[in-house]
Structure formats: structure tokens, C-alpha cells
Image (cartoon, rainbow, N blue to C red):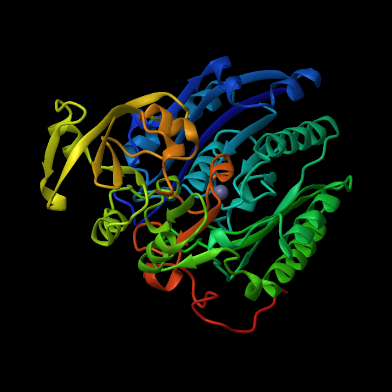
Amino acid sequence: MKVIVASFQCESNSKANLHPQKSDFEYFAGWDIFKKLVVKNIFEDAGFEIIPSIYANALPSATVERHIYEYYKEQIMDTVRRNPDVDGIYIYVHGSMEVDEIGSGELQLVKEIRQIVSRECLIAFTMDLHANITNELGQYVDIICGYKTAPHTDQPESQVRAATALTYCLQNGIKPHTYVQKIPMLVKGDTMLTRQEPLRSLEAETVLLEERADIFGANLFFGHCWIDAPNTGASAVVSAADPDTARQIAKDLANKLWNTRKEYRFRIEAELPEECVRRAIAGEEKRIFITDSGDNTTAGAEGTSEDILKLFLNAGPGKKTCVAGITDLEIVETLWNKKDGETVFVEKLGCRGTIKAHGEILGWAKEIIGRSLTISFDNVDAVFTEKRSAFIEKGNFDKANVDLLEYEIVVVKLGYLFEELKPYADRELFALSDGASCVELARLNLQRIARPMYPLEDFEWIAQ
Ligand SMILES: [Zn+2]
């Protein structure tokens, strides 16, 4: 048996402006892809011949421009064209890659692959829980295994499940059927957490289903609300040996998820930015974090908003405050040659500050991607970065030469705080700010999504 292995991932955000460029993709080709993928042993142990293609993965960004998409897609297609007799293809994708003029990047990729390989060739996908699955995808992909955790902690396990199922089906001559049942709901991602009920039980049910010998993937996908496209929304997707089983279980899971739709709400303090700033200043905890969720750089936003910084500058807090990771090439470039301690006038903020620290910013793969400049405005320090950045752990502050432990209030451009920052946060405030990653569906003004769509409309629905 011969299997091709590849990965091409980028979560898109239609409201964002920064389209990913080649330099934004972490990229490996050939055997190096297994620095990032964990499925090599599975195919090796089965005695399969592995044909590694590419691994390309970028931080969530605006839609993917066509030429960038083609550049990576064609490399995978080259591998397929050189091996048209392949028995199986394993691809790790996100599932919410939106390509200009094309739509779903994953659907287009698999459609083109199917034009080359035979119907007997089995294709397996690992996908993110926030994938916007296209109805048609089930016609082209035989096995789909999505993450079962949000926040995501089971990416390796999800790769293993799909690769193991692919191996099993190839060895036993099984041709699975995948059924996609769309669910007309689009609940904000940050409220759907799998460690809490009702999702904990629902995900446990999918795990049990996958223990059956005839089911190769039982998935709930929550969808991704920041893409304005007809396939945006939740879905239940089941891959099984028998088409009726796949359809029946997918419909059953879909109804179960639909019936929980009203149970998702924030279980932390989620307030408008002004209220978050007020509460942070008045709060008695040692260190309070605010997440600027509308400008969440890990969700495709640019991180350029100074709104919360300005609220703090106006409030003049008596507490040491740090706003970390404001993307501003101009400030970094024009003030980089100033020395620490030097007084500068920051025109766009209309105020005087002191240069506090020169530093570096870490990229998604923890490589250094540019410079940061921290400026103090009395008690409020702002870390400006020349490129988009995500302050997800203490290491990001260290690299910027800023001491996280010095602050009583810290603002970062995230949705939920990453686990790595939680030990430093005695309290967490989720700011419902505007921006490309705004979590209020009604404020996103989506034009192309299917309607009706809960919670924009509430209505009766059943998958049958
Ligand atoms: Zn996700």
C-alpha cells in the first residue's frame, strides 16, 4: 500500500485585512513534514510506503489570496500527479480556509485530487473543530476526524485517529461513506467549551461511537463565524462503513447539538471594553487580565486597535498596566533609534511617553519575527510590535524585555486567555470589543451565510 501525507492549514477571517503571504506559512517539504505531523509510525507499522508531500500552516488571517493558495495546493497536486496509483491520502487541514474567488480551499483541493486518483483511493482528513464543513465534502473525502476539544488539546490524537482509520480501511478493503449534516447554528466559539456540559457529554458520545468497528469518524463541528460564506455554520459529520449508518448517526448528533443551542453563554466576566477597564481598575486582585476579543490576533484580527489603550490613558489608572502586542509598524520604525529612558511624543495618541524597552516578537512557531518597542505613559506601558503578534505566554513578554510580573493589569489581544497565561491571572475579563474577531454575531453583519441561522433567528428545526 502506498499513502500520500500532507498538511495545508490556515483559518480564514473575512473581516480581517491581512492576507497571509508565503512568509506567514510555517513550511516543510518531504520527510521534514514529520517534524509537525505524528502519523508516520502508523503507516510505517502497517508496512505502507509513505510519500510525504508538504506541510504549510499559517496563523489565522484574512482570506487566502488565490496565488498563495495555488502555490501550496499545486505542491500537493504535484505529489498526487506523480503517484496517481496511490492507495490512500492523508491530509491535515483546518476546514475554514476561505480562498478568494474559490471558496472553501479544502473542498477545492480534494475535488482536484479526485480528478486524478481512482474512486478506490481512500482520502482521510483531520480537521479543526471550528471547520465550516461544506455539504459536498462527504462526496470526496472518505474519512473525517475532527478535534474533540475546545480549547484544542487533542490535535495529535485527531491525526492518529484519522490515520489509523485510513490504515484499517485500506487493510480490510473497506470503502467508508461520509455524511455531512449541516446544523443551522453559529454559536460564538468562545462559549462552546468541551470541558463543560453539555459538550462534555456530547463529545464523550462521539468517542464511544468511534469505538464501534464500523464507524471511523463521529464528529461535531462548531463552525467558524468569521467567514462570510454559504457553508459557515455547525455540522455533524460521520464516516461509517455503511451509508445509512453514517446518515442516521450524523442526523442524531446534529439534533442533539441543536437542542443544546441555548445553553452556550460566557461563563466568565464578558463586558464591553469600558466596563472591563472600570472593573480592572477597581478590582482588588493582584493581577487582572483583559482580553481584547474583537482584535484577537489568534483569530485573524490585525491587533492594531488602540481603543483599550486609550481607555486606560484617559482613565490614568493608579495601577501598573501593560497593553501587549499592538501592531504598529510606524511607531516601531520611527522610534526604534530612541534610547531607553528617552522621552518621545507619540503623535497618533497625542501624548508624551518614555521609551521603556526594545525587544523582539515571537512568531507562531516561536521563531523571532520582528522588533517590539515598549513605551511608558506614566503607569501604562504599551508594547508596540512591527508585525502582528500574539502574546499567549510569558515568553512573549520576556522576548519583548517586559516583566509580566511587574503589572497589576495586563491587556492582551486574545479571546480566552491561553492556558499558559492563566497562572499569572488572578482574574480574567473578556472585553466584547469591536473588530475583525468580534464575538457578537449580530455585529458581524454577515451577508452570505445560510439563513435562518441561530442565534440571528430562533426557530424550530430537526434533521430528518
Ligand atoms: Zn479551532
Whether residue 262 sits left or right of residue 340 in the image: it is right
Q: How many marks?
A: 0
Q: Residue furthest bottom?
A: 459
Whether residue 212 sits left or right of residue 419 in the image: it is right
Whether residue 151 sits left or right of residue 381 in the image: it is right
| Quadrant in the rendering for residue 353 | top left
Q: Position of residue 50 (x, y in %)?
A: 67, 19
* Along the line of sight, the residue nearer the viewer: 272 or 448: 272
Please report the residue visible at 57 percent of the width from the left and 53 percent of the height from the top: 130
* Along the line of sight, the residue nearer the viewer: 19 or 395: 395
| Quadrant in the rendering for residue 338 | top left
* Along the line of sight, the residue nearer the viewer: 258 or 73: 258
Dividing the image into 4 quarters, which one contains the N terminus? top right
Q: Position of residue 88 (x, y in %)?
A: 68, 31
Please report the residue visible at 87 percent of the width from the left and 46 percent of the height from the top: 211
> Is residue 6 something that shows in the picture?
yes
Dividing the image into 4 quarters, which one contains the C terminus? bottom right
> Is residue 122 something that shows in the picture?
no
Q: Position of residue 443 (x, y in %)?
A: 38, 71
Please report the residue visible at 63 percent of the width from the left and 76 percent of the height from the top: 262
Whether residue 301 sits left or right of residue 392 in the image: it is left
Q: Position of residue 6 (x, y in %)?
A: 57, 29
